[in-house]
Image: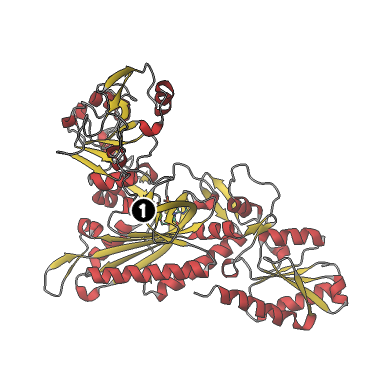
Amino acid sequence: MRYSRMFIPTVKEIPADAETASHKLMIRAGLIRKVASGTYTYLPLGWRSLLKVIAIVREEMDKAGAQEILVPSMQPKELWDRTGRSTDYGPTMFSLKDRHGRMNVLGPTAEEVFTTLVAGEIKSYKQLPINLYQISPKFRDEFRPRFGPVRSREFIMKDAYSFDADPAGLDESYKSMYDAYCRVFKRCGLEYVIVEAESGEMGGSGSHQFTVPCESGEDTIVYTEDGSYAANLERADVDPLAKEIANAEIPPMEEVHTPNIGSIEAVCKFLKTQPKDMIKTIVLSTPIFSREVLKHWSAEEAKHDGRDVIMGPEYGTVPKRVLALVRGDHEINMEKLMEVWGGEHLELADEEIIERLTGAKVGFAGPVGIKKERFNKIIIDHAIAAMAVGITGANKTDYHTKNVVPGRDFPLEGDNVTVADIRYAGEGDTHNGKKLLFKKGIEVGQVFKLGTKYSEKLGAKFLRTDGHEAPCLMGCYGIGVNRILASAIELGNDNNGIIWPISIAPFEVLATAVNQDDDKVAQVAEDIYQQLLDSGIDVLLDDRVLRGGVKFKDADLIGIPIRVTVGKKSVAEGSVEIKLRCESQSQKVPIEKAADKTIEMVNSLKEQLKA
Ligand code: ATP
Ligand code: MG
């Protein structure tokens, strides 16, 4: 390719909404352009890199025995209703009505379609195992699209689905995908860590997440120094805290007037205490549509918002309620809570419901004397059970209660009461007695053991050797293709631009004719370019008639790993300069050896990325 003919719109300005190095550089180096919030066009350089990532992913999937297919991105919403995932994904899932009034979704992933396909085609154990995958656009109406391609609303995902006849088979499929992922990320030049993860909206048991540690990541990896434990923040289990021993006997509970003071911070200031001495009481409920929504939409239409309608008492059936307690300085972890609850999707109850259930305005709820029968479950964090004494809402507007002793003043056991780990790990927490450490990262892939959640609901069954019918055991495996690109840039950049790993760089070599208007220089550059092309090297020739300084700036910005510089002075001496983007020193090589030397360097860089 000739630079003079290529569409590489590099820019100096940093876009206002770009916060991370990768986002800034992808725009500045002319890899992407924003179309709308969370949607991007890939320009020639960006697309070339993306295609290289896709090729690596495809090779490794094929090698692992998975077979590529393509399913539609637009899928009937009815399929998602059958698994209950329209509710789980909620507003994150794009939906649209077709001209016949049928609802469709734009797939955020594709378990439903793959499982339905297998349900229709696979009948016997003889056809198992099978692993199918696709590399295709996915759609998620992210609440906060940001960091460019890292959290976008349309992105390319590789998603694979395995179907096995027995647990040992599932383990094997899982392991083979896990290993393939290691090879993919290694070949893409990424440093990564593998952590235990939460299976989240996917359901099922067992999951690992592949995360690239970097400051701008939105994920937090929690680990112990000796490497014996690593999990993501959603999943990281913490040891129960040691039971606090009170210095003196705790006096009886006492109600205190806290007028209009509902938030933890405000109460702490007013009562001169600390968040860690507060008992936070959270009221949760299965989703209900507000009257506001139902005023405008019929229940049937409201369903198309991506959630099932569960009517509040005012509309008939009673939704489920859960009361959760965590310490004032701790944050509730909904994933952990959902696991303990084990029931339908929960969300924070709205003000009206909180008032009705607790008898007080928001900010004044507490476990003491609350009407237990109004809740399907009360889930208490371990750290609350370890408190000697605390302060909590009095279930009376503008009042709190002091000297509350968990276990004495409200029960820690009994019907529907559970003490469990339902908060995020924080500074000072331990796991198996070892101190937990934290670092940021970008999730580039995740593998899940799904079990029979989807195969049961969607009828993906097969006849076993003994003639009985059983649901397939499934696994699902996702890779964020665009995130690989962004993470590679997060890891490889300096003040001047991108430093690509050779495997996914838009070109392997950049041949720069410093003085394109000098015939001799242009000819030497052209010859080297042709020799490299003939040897199958992916090379870009910078044949633009521009000042050398401008060309070098662009070269550093777009970050091609090897640069062959052909200048007037060195050509006069019979040599050219070869330089790695990641090093500052260049080396002089005789013109006639330039191509061979470059090829040798390409091979050596590639060798380092072999899986
Ligand atoms: P996150 O927690 O970051 O929202 P996720 O765990 O919901 O991601 P998965 O359902 O596991 O994502 O999807 C598989 C892969 O797709 C992820 O590992 C990630 O690399 C990629 N991915 C998910 N959401 C996005 C997005 N909005 N933009 C770009 N890539 C994404
Ligand atoms: Mg994930």
Q: Name the outermost residue toward the front.
A: 248
Hey, what amino acid is under mark 1?
His
Q: Is residue 428 rendered to the left or right of residue 186?
A: left
Assign ligand 1 to one image quadrant: bottom left
Question: Looking at the image, which residue is at 55% across and 72% down?
Answer: 609
Q: Position of residue 485 (x, y in %)?
A: 54, 60
Q: Nearer the viewer, residue 254 or 526?
A: 254
Q: Position of residue 73 (x, y in %)?
A: 39, 55
The mark tally for this picture is 1
Residue annotated with mark 1: 431
Relative to 436, is 501 above or below? below
Query: Is residue 7 at least partly visible in the picture?
Result: no
Viewport quadrant of the N terminus: bottom right
Question: Looking at the image, which residue is at 41% across and 76% down?
Answer: 63
Q: Nearer the viewer, residue 320 or 15?
A: 320
User: Does label 1 point to a residue whose CB lies under 8 Å from ligand 2?
Assistant: no
Question: Looking at the image, which residue is at 68% across and 62% down?
Answer: 6
Q: Is residue 332 rendered to the left or right of residue 488?
A: left
Q: Residues within 10 Å of mark 1 (few under 14, many from 20)?
A: some
Q: Position of residue 478 (x, y in %)?
A: 40, 60
